[in-house]
Image (tube, rainbow, N blue to C red):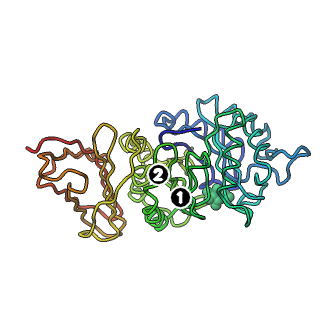
Amino acid sequence: MIKSTPPMGWNSWNTFGNDIHEQMIFETADVLADSGLAAKGYEYLVIDDCWSLKERDAAGRLVADPVKFPHGMKAVADYVHSKGLKFGMYSCAGNLTCAGYPGSFEHEFIDAETFASWGVDFLKYDYCYHSPIIPGQYLYRRMGLALENCGRDILFSACSWGVDETHEWIKTTGASMWRSTGDIADSWESVKNLAKQQERLHPYLGHGCFNDMDMLIVGMYGKGNVALTGCTDTQYKTHFSLWAFLSSPLMIGCDIRHMSQATRQILTNDEIIRINQDPACRQPFKLTSFWSGDDVLNYARHLDGGDIAIGFFNLNDHPATARVNLDEMGLPHSTGKTLAMKELWTGEQFTVTNSTIIKDLAPCDCAVYRARIIDQP
Ligand code: GLA
C-alpha cells in the first residue's frame, strides 16, 4: 500500500503499554471520531504490543487475549470501522515481540492473512528478538510481501529504530513509514535527542515512505507507559511542530479521553497539520544557525504551490534569537523577491526586509511560518 502523505492516528503504547483492553479502545475510537480529531486527519487507531495470548492456536495462528478483548479482534476492527476510522495492529519480525508475545518470524504469511481476516488496515512491525543471522531487510521484505498478498490494503509501518542502516533498504520492503529513531519517552530531553538523531536522515524521507520519529508525547504530562518527567505545554507545542515540520507520521500517544484544552489545541492546529500533509512532501533543509548556537534548529521546506515553510525551534531552556538569510532558501536579494510571513501559532504577519529574518524565541519555544513569495516593496 502506498500512502502519499504522513499517516496520522493514535497508538496505545505511550500511555497504556500492557494495560490495553477492548473498552478503552472503544472509548478511544469514540473520542477520535467525535472530538474532531478524525476530521483533522487522525484516522488510524493502532493497538500496539501485548494484545495476544502467549501461545498460537493449534493451526499456528495468533490469538487475541480473550480477557483483554473478549469479543475478539474482528469485533474491535468492526467497531473502529463503524466510527469511520481505520484499524491498526502490531507484530514483530522476531520470534517474540518486544514485550515477549509471539512474533511473526516464520509465520509472516499466515499472520498477514489473520490480520486481513480481522479487517486490519495498518501493521506496525517491530524488530526485537530477530534472527542474528538473517539480515533485517530480508525479514521486512517477507512481511512486506505477505501484506501485499493478503488480499487487503494494509499500511506497513516498519519499526527497526533506524538500526542496521534501515534507511538504505527500507524502501525495498513496501513500508510506508519507518521508525528512524529509538523509542521516545515523555521528557524534553527525549524530544531534543530524537530531533537531533533525525538530522542525518532527512534525505531519506519523501513520498510514500516517511521517517517516523515515534509516537507523540503531547498531552502525557508525565503519566503513562513511557512517562518520564513530562513536558510543559510550550515543550509539547515545539515537539509537535518539529514532528509535523519534518514530515513524521503524527500518531497521538496520550489518553485522548482526558485530553486538556491545551493538548487539543496543539494536536488540531490546522496550519501545522497542513505543513505536515503538504502534497509535495519535499525534504526539509537546515538553515545556518551559527548566530544562535546548535540548540536552535532552523529548518525550511519548499511547499507544493511555491510557498516555503520556515521553522525556528529553540531547544534551549533559555531565550534565544533565530537569524536566517533568504539566500539559503533560493531567494537572494537579486531576485527582487521577498517573503510575506505568517506565523502559524500566533497568526503574526510581516514582510521580510533586507533578506533577513530575526526572531526572538522564548525558552523551549518555536515559531513556524508559512511564507509567500512577493515582490520586494
Ligand atoms: C519497541 C517499539 C515501541 C513499542 C514497544 C512495544 O520498543 O519501538 O514503539 O512498540 O516495542 O513493546
Dots 2 and 1: beta carbons under 8 Å?
A: yes
Quadrant holding the N terminus:
top right
Which residue, as the protein is rendered here, is positioned at the far left? 377
Where residue 234 sits: x, y (%)?
38, 57
Coordinates of residue 221 in the picture (x, y in percent): 51, 58
Q: Residue at x 16, y 47 (%)?
A: 338
Q: Residue furthest right?
A: 58
Position of 51 with respect to 301 (left or right) is right
Q: Please tell me in which quarter of the rendered image ligand 1 is found.
A: bottom right
256 and 129: which is toward the camera:
129
Closer to us: 242 or 331 = 331
- For badge 1, the amino acid type reads Ser
Mark 1 CB lies closer than 8 A to ligand 1: no
Which residue is rendered at x = 13% and y = 52% of the image?
333
- Real-space Cα separation, disc 2 to disc 1, in angstroms: 10 Å
Residue 180: numbered disc:
1
Residue beneath label 2, please? 205
Tell whether 107 sits left or right of 283: right
What's the amino acid at mark 2?
A: Leu
**Hey, which quadrant is residue 337 in on the image?**
top left
Look at the numbered disc 2 and give the secondary structure of its residue: loop
Q: Measured along the vertical axis of the image, is residue 355 above or below residue 265? A: below
Mark 2 vs mark 1: in front: 2
How far across and down, in percent of the image, does residue 20 sit?
70, 49
Callout 1: SS: loop
Crowd tier of the residue under label 1, counting other residues whose Cα lies within 10 Å: few below 14, some 14–19, many 20 or above? many
